C-alpha cells in the first residue's frame, strides 16, 4: 500500500530546514558513500554528512513529525524510523533503478519514504518513479508532503533537468512486515474508528438497535487486535 501525507512538516519548518541545508556551513558528500555495491553504480546525488550536528538535529525533527502523525501510525505500524538521509540533486543528478536493501544498519526496511523539501515548481525532472503492476508511477509532491511505499518496490529518481531537488528519505521497520497484511489491518482500523465515532448518535436514538454498533465494534476490534497479534513480529 502506498499513501501520501500532506503537510508532514509545516511551511515554516520546511523553510527553516531548507535554509539550514543550503547554507554554506552544511557538509555535503557523495551519495555513493552510503550506497550498496550495486546501487553505488546508479546513485548520483549528494547527501548531508550523517555524522554532522545538523544531520542529527534535522533527522530528529523529521522522525518526531512522522511518529506523531496518526495516518503513519495506523498505516505503517512503525517500530522504528531509521536511516534518515538528506539528499540533494542538481542538474544531471538522479538515482537509477534499484530496490532498497532489506536490512539497514538500524533495522529492517519494510516501508520507504520520501519527504519533499523543494517546491515542485523550483526544479524540473527529479520525479520519484515507483514501479507498479500498472507501470511507472511518477511522484512529485509539494514541500512538506511525504510519500510512503513498500520497500520491495523497484524505483528510481529521474535526472534533474533544471533547478535543485532537496528531499529527506528514510525507512520504517513495521510491526507487520508484509504490505498486504498492513493494508488489511489499516482497513479494519479505519472501519472500527468510523464505527466508534458514530456510536454516539446511534445510542442517543435509542430503540432495539441501539446496542448493535457496540457489538459490531467489539467484533471488528477483536479481529484487528488478534490479526495484529498473529502477524506482528
Image (cartoon, grey):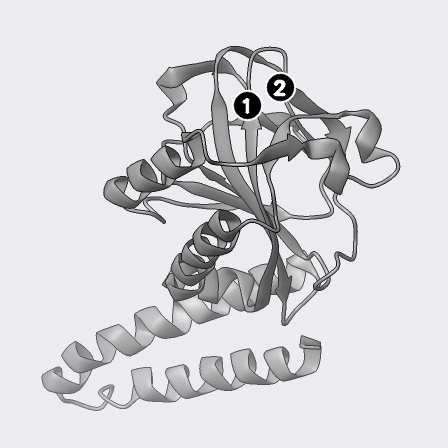
Q: Quadrant of the C terminus?
A: bottom right
Position in image of residue 42 (x %, y %): 78, 25
- Towards the viewer: 109 or 179: 109
Whether the residues at callouts 1 and 2 have beta carbons within 8 Å, the answer is: yes
> What residue does disc 1 label?
127
Mark toward the start of the polypeptide (1 vs 2): 1
Position in image of residue 81 (x %, y %): 57, 61
Q: What residue appears at the point 44 percent right and 50 percent down from the top-left corner?
A: 58
Give the tally of numbered discs: 2
Viewed as shown, does residue 211 lie left or right of 218? left
Q: Is residue 30 above or below residue 56?
A: above
Label 1 crowd bin: few (<14), some (14–19), many (20+), radius 10 Å? many
Q: What residue appears at the point 74 percent right and 47 percent down from the top-left corner?
A: 152
Kindly indicate the quadrant of the structure image that contains residue 143: top left
Label 2 crowd bin: few (<14), some (14–19), many (20+), radius 10 Å? many
Viewed as shown, does residue 167 lie left or right of 211? right
Furthest-front residue in view? 25
Position in image of residue 185 (x %, y %): 55, 68
- Towards the viewer: 172 or 189: 172
- Towards the viewer: 72 or 224: 72
Mark 1, secondary structure of its residue: loop
Regarding residue 84, the answer to whether it shows in the image is yes
> What residue does disc 2 label?
158
**Residues at marks 1 and 2, CA–CA distance in whole angstroms:** 5 Å
Amino acid at each position: 500500500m502506498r499513501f501520501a501525507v500532506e503537510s508532514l512538516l509545516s511551511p515554516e519548518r520546511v523553510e527553516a530546514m531548507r535554509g539550514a541545508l543550503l547554507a554554506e556551513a552544511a557538509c555535503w558528500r557523495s551519495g555513493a558513500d552510503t550506497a550498496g555495491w550495486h546501487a553505488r553504480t546508479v546513485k548520483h546525488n549528494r547527501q548531508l554528512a550523517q555524522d554532522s550536528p545538523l544531520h542529527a538535529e534535522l533527522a530528529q525533527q523529521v522522525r518526531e513529525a512522522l511518529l506523531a502523525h496518526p495516518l503513519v501510525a495506523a498505516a505503517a505500524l512503525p517500530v522504528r524510523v531509521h536511516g534518515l538521509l538528506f539528499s540533494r540533486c542538481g542538474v544531471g543528478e538522479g538515482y537509477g533503478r534499484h530496490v532498497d536493501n532489506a536490512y539497514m544498519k538500524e533495522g529492517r526496511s519494510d516501508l520507504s519514504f520520501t519527504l519533499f523539501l523543494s517546491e515542485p515548481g523550483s526544479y524540473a525532472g527529479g520525479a520519484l518513479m515507483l514501479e507498479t503492476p500498472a507501470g511507472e508511477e511518477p511522484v512529485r509532491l509539494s514541500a512538506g508532503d511525504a510519500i510512503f511505499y513498500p520497500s520491495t518496490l523497484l524505483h528510481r529518481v529521474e535526472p534533474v533537468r533544471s533547478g535543485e531537488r532537496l528531499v529527506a528519505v528514510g525507512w520504517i521497520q513495521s510491526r507487520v512486515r508484509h504490505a498486504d497484511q498492513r493494508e488489511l489491518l489499516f482497513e479494519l482500523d479505519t472501519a472500527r474508528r468510523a464505527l466508534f465515532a458514530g456510536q454516539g448518535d446511534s445510542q442517543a436514538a435509542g430503540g432495539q438497535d441501539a446496542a448493535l454498533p457496540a457489538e459490531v465494534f467489539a467484533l471488528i476490534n477483536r479481529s484487528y487486535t488478534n490479526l495484529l497479534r498473529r502477524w506482528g513480529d
